[in-house]
Amino acid sequence: MKLSMVIPTYNERDNIPKLIQKIQEEFKENKIDGEIIMVDDNSPDGTGKILEDLKKKYKNLKVIHRTGKLGLSSAVLDGWKIANGEVLGVMDADLSHPPEKIKELFWEIEKGEADFTIGSRYVKGGEIKGWTLKRKLMSKTATLLARIYTKVKDPMTGFFMIKKEVIRDAELNPKGFKILLEVIIKGRYQTIKEIPITFINRVEGKSKAGTKEILYYLRNLAGYLSYKKKVIKEFFKFAIVGGIGTLVNVVILYLLTEKAGIYYIISAIFSFVIAMTSNFILNKIWTFEESIKSETAKKYLQFGLVSTTALLINLIFLYLFTEIFGVYYIISQILAIGMALIINFLGNKIWIFNK
């Protein structure tokens, strides 16, 4: 098989010569028939000029010059359009991804062990070096949100390979710099394999991550719902169960307080537990279609923790909307319930009932 590695660039003049040399060494040492496709977004630091000079040295180097900063994901797609390889690869230009792992990702596909390989920071043996706590939290949050759509542990990495057939008929149109999740959702493949890598934060240049990219990512996540109709169905079922639970809660509270004469705070605790139990059973067997016997005790405790967290989030947003933003408290409660419902669903989908 031939490998085509696509590498988007923007202001990477200090990293490009080192990276290309390392990749060429990997190709030679491991007898990989490979080509490198650099896609430059009109870098003002002269990256394009350096690439043109390197083309004279390396015959398997292709360069695409684009008219402006059009984004990483579209750069990858442009590179794939001119790729000759049966295997398509992607990696960053900033030396964060280890070129020595190219052979492992490629060999798994060449041996027929996988259609899709991922350089993963979050499987056993994977590691991140040099990130701040803020950057780690952002990455973990993005990864957690992606778990709605996939069980891949690192769907945010920029280092992966696929057979060309995986995307042959796929309509890929991601925004921002996270293309992997798009391929996972829309591609056609049988087996994904994650290979542990050590991700090292860039030494030269600046990170391209920013608020704009975060907004693109959130918009992409919302757009993927149409490809995962099961998730939409589960969300509406979850909302219905929540409505039933609310009714159960109110009825039990009324009966215990008005008919049994129990102090209303005690009644509220009992009614909450009964309603939560009812919700758990209905969500387990109806919403997420699990056997009632499957890890019931463990998942019930998890469900209780998520439900309690959602209740606290409800109260926090109720306070913020009412006291900070001056919204009428009834409207605030509706908004807060909506926020809590989404977070409650995500907690159940990702942590408890993620099949």
Image (tube, rainbow, N blue to C red):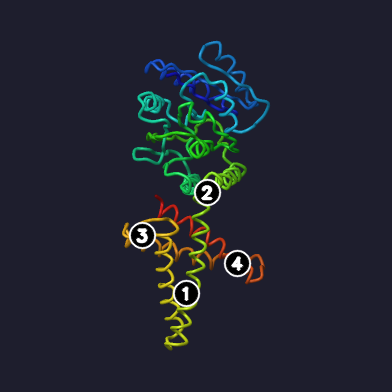
Q: Nearer the viewer, mark 4 or mark 1?
A: 1
- Which amino acid lies under the numbered mark 1 shown in the image of this protein? Asn
Q: Are marks 4 and 1 in contact (CB under 8 Å)?
A: no
Task: Say how many tags the image has.
Answer: 4
- Crowding near the residue tagged with mark 4, few <14, some 14–19, many ≥20 C-alpha atoms within 10 Å: few
Q: Which residue is mark 1?
A: 249
Q: Secondary structure at mark 1?
A: helix
161 on left or right of 123: right
Q: Which residue is mark 4?
A: 334
42 on left or right of 243: right
Q: Residue 341: percent from the left, percent from the top?
A: 52, 61
Q: Secondary structure at mark 4?
A: helix
Residue 133 visible in rendering: no
Decide which of tag 1 and tag 2 comes sooner along the chain.
2
Q: Are marks 3 and 1 in contact (CB under 8 Å)?
A: no
- Crowding near the residue tagged with mark 1, few <14, some 14–19, many ≥20 C-alpha atoms within 10 Å: many
Q: Are marks 4 and 3 in contact (CB under 8 Å)?
A: no
Q: Residue 104: percent from the left, percent from the top?
A: 37, 27
Task: Give the CA distance from mark 1 to mark 2.
Answer: 30 Å
Decide which of tag 4 and tag 1 comes sooner along the chain.
1
Task: Give the CA distance from mark 4 to mark 2.
Answer: 26 Å
Disc assigned to residue 229: 2
Q: In front: 122, or 261?
A: 261
Q: Residue at x 33, y 61 (%)?
A: 296
- Which amino acid lies under the numbered mark 4 shown in the image of this protein? Ile
Task: Give the CA distance from mark 4 to mark 3.
Answer: 28 Å
Disc assigned to residue 299: 3
- Crowding near the residue tagged with mark 3, few <14, some 14–19, many ≥20 C-alpha atoms within 10 Å: some
Decide which of tag 4 and tag 3 comes sooner along the chain.
3
Q: Secondary structure at mark 3?
A: helix
